Amino acid sequence: MQRANIFRAPQSVGPDGLAGFMLFWSLIVVLPLAALLFWSLFPLENFKIAWQPSLDAYRDLLASGRWEVTVRTLRIAVIVTLIELAIGFPFALWLAKGTQSTAIKVTALALLTIPFFLSLSARTIVWRAVLGLNGPVNAMLLHLGIIDQPLDWLLFSEFAVVIGTIGPYFPTMVFPLYLAMNLIDDEVLAASKDLGASPAFTLFHVVLPLSFPGLAAGLVFTFIPMIGDPVVPTLLGGGQVIVLSASIQSLLQILDYSAAAALSVFMLLLMVALILILVLAARRAFGTGVGQ
């Protein structure tokens, strides 16, 4: 009796399979996006749909307070993403090419998965005790004589939101970078060194272009969730750091679905803009073939 080969090469998807995939994709992606766009254009009047399309919800995005919230959200997301990149890039490079110990790599990768076993609320609430007036940070600064009284801006501020966000999103920056750098052939790096290239030249002209897919993925996986994260700003902002996600929740609570949908569409456009910027930057820096 011939044993079945479970490692057969994947075969191309037929028309039936493609149709099923497109139907599934439409149900989970296209249909919700279409509904979101519909609610942003057709507001509710007296709990009934006004079938006359209107752009009032989008005009209200420029109203007082909304623009400030948008700028604050983008500022926090950009700062956190840059910090993650500054820390995560050298760490991923060391993990992929700087150490040859398998035990160290396995241990480091295992430690990076720990945040995924805890809820974001549990990972964030700890910082309220750390950054509080009676927390260890203020206690240490007072003990060293750096300050005369506890700093009240450590908690319930943009600073607290930034600090509390670095840890949860650090793995989403490191993992894509590590995977991309781990695929770089060591012989390529050795050849660059043999040809007289300096470490800095090798980093910017060899490692960076070859690891750009991981870099782009890390930026997307960090920046985009940051824009839509309502947990950290709520717990560490204390109602004083209002971001776009919190604004959407407030609009839903007052049953202003049209404005909430318009704000959600605006957030999606911000995410699409980020991806387009990354593709254009890749084409400009590494050649026109990137992203095609």
Image (tube, helix red, strand yellow):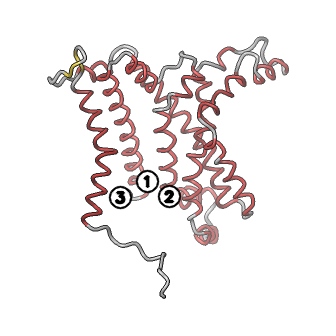
Q: Earlier in the sequence, mark 2 or mark 1?
A: 2
Picture coordinates of residue 236, whole percent (x, y)? 60, 23
C-alpha gap between disc 2 and disc 3: 13 Å
Instruction: Give neighbour class at mark 1: few <14, some 14-19, many 20+ (Cα, 10 Å).
Output: few
What amino acid type should be assigned to the residue bearing mark 1? Ala
Q: Residue at x 46, y 33 (%)?
A: 227
**Tag count:** 3
C-alpha gap between disc 1 and disc 3: 9 Å
The residue closer to the viewer here, 77 or 230, is: 230
What amino acid type should be assigned to the residue bearing mark 2? Pro
Picture coordinates of residue 58, whole percent (x, y)? 27, 24
Q: Which mark is residue 209?
A: 2
> Could you say which quadrant of the image residue 154 lies in?
top right
* Marks 2, 1: nearer the viewer: 2
Q: Residue furthest front?
A: 1
4 vs 256: above or below: below
> Could you say which quadrant of the image residue 125 lies in?
top right
Q: Circles 2 and 1: CB distance less than 8 Å? A: yes
Q: Which mark is residue 82?
A: none
> Could you say which quadrant of the image residue 208 lies in?
bottom right
Q: Residue at x 40, y 24 (%)?
A: 248
Give the SS element for disc 3: loop
235 vs 285: above or below: above
The residue closer to the viewer here, 125 or 263, is: 125
Q: Which mark is residue 285?
A: 1
Q: Residue furthest left?
A: 52
Give the SS element for disc 2: helix
Q: Residue at x 58, y 40 (%)?
A: 169
Q: Earlier in the sequence, mark 2 or mark 3?
A: 2
- Residue of label 3: 288
Instruction: Give neighbour class at mark 2: few <14, some 14-19, many 20+ (Cα, 10 Å).
Output: some
Picture coordinates of residue 29, whole percent (x, y)? 33, 44
